[in-house]
Image (tube, rainbow, N blue to C red):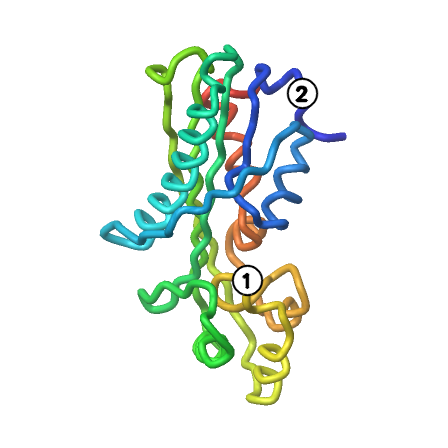
Amino acid sequence: MNPLTKNDALSYRIILASKSPRRKELLAKTGLPFEICPSVGEEIKRGQNCRQIVMNLAHDKAKEVYDLTADNGHSLCNTPLLVIGADTIVVYKDEILGKPKDKDDARRMISMLSGNSHDVYTGVCLYYSDGKTNENVKVHTFFEGTKVEFYSLSEEKIEAYISCPDPYDKAGSYGIQGDFAIYVKGIRGDYNNVVGLPLARLYHEMKELGIIF
């Protein structure tokens, strides 16, 4: 049974500001109806540390989609609106590893992470209002962190992996839920956070805010 039902969401119109199929699959586990409206703005990394950076990225995505939706007349329909923005980064020795630019970049990242531990941070931003006026907009942002350890990969294994499409749309050049799972020695923290959305944390944050019961 899904933990949530449509009535739990206080009639919110929920929008996920992401095109990630993995975040879509995770959010669908709540049983709540939601729409997909990916943010398209340029990602600007700002903040004093990786945690602030990932939260700011999530905030910018949520705000962009909220503003776009409000400008399209949503604020006149008196329906509560919730936009969920999320961004995930991989961090190794204070270097933020985003999506690889090319095969050489993917090789560099996987070689760096091979046999080592790194951190994965997902920032989440909830941009929401009662739908009556933009003056009542509320913003809640948080992050979740998970430590991931890899087995050592040979050069041949690295070359084989970066020759497939899997690394090129993922931070750090790998997906823990795909074929690369055989090289994950262990994790400490939320597995779903590494996939792209800390679902349990999101649920409890929404509950504390009164968005769901």
Please name the residue that numbered disc 1 is placed on. 169
Disc 1, disc 2: CB below 8 Å? no
In primary-sequence order, the first of circles 1 and 2 is 2
Residue 139 occupies which quadrant of the picture?
top left
Residue on which the image places disc 2: 6
Q: Secondary structure at mark 2?
A: helix
The quadrant the N terminus occupies is top right
Name the residue nearer the viewer: 173 or 150. 173
Looking at this rendering, what residue extends furthest in the right direction?
1
| Amino acid marked by disc 2 | Lys
Q: CA distance from mark 1 to mark 2?
A: 32 Å
Taking 203 as reference, is 111 above or below it?
below
Question: Where residue 126 sits: x, y (%)?
Answer: 44, 31
Disc 1 is placed on an element classified as helix
187 on left or right of 137:
right
Above or below residue 20? Residue 185 is below
Label 2, residues with CA under 10 Å away: few <14, some 14-19, many ≥20:
few
Quarter occupied by the C terminus: top right
Residue drawn at x 51%, y 56% as measured from the top left: 188
Residue 65: x percent and y percent?
45, 35
| Nearer the camera: disc 1 or disc 2 | 1
Residue at 57% x, 64% y is: 186
| Nearer to me, 117 or 120 | 120
Q: Position of residue 72 (x, y in %)?
A: 47, 25
Dividing the picture into quadrants, the one containing residue 67 is top left
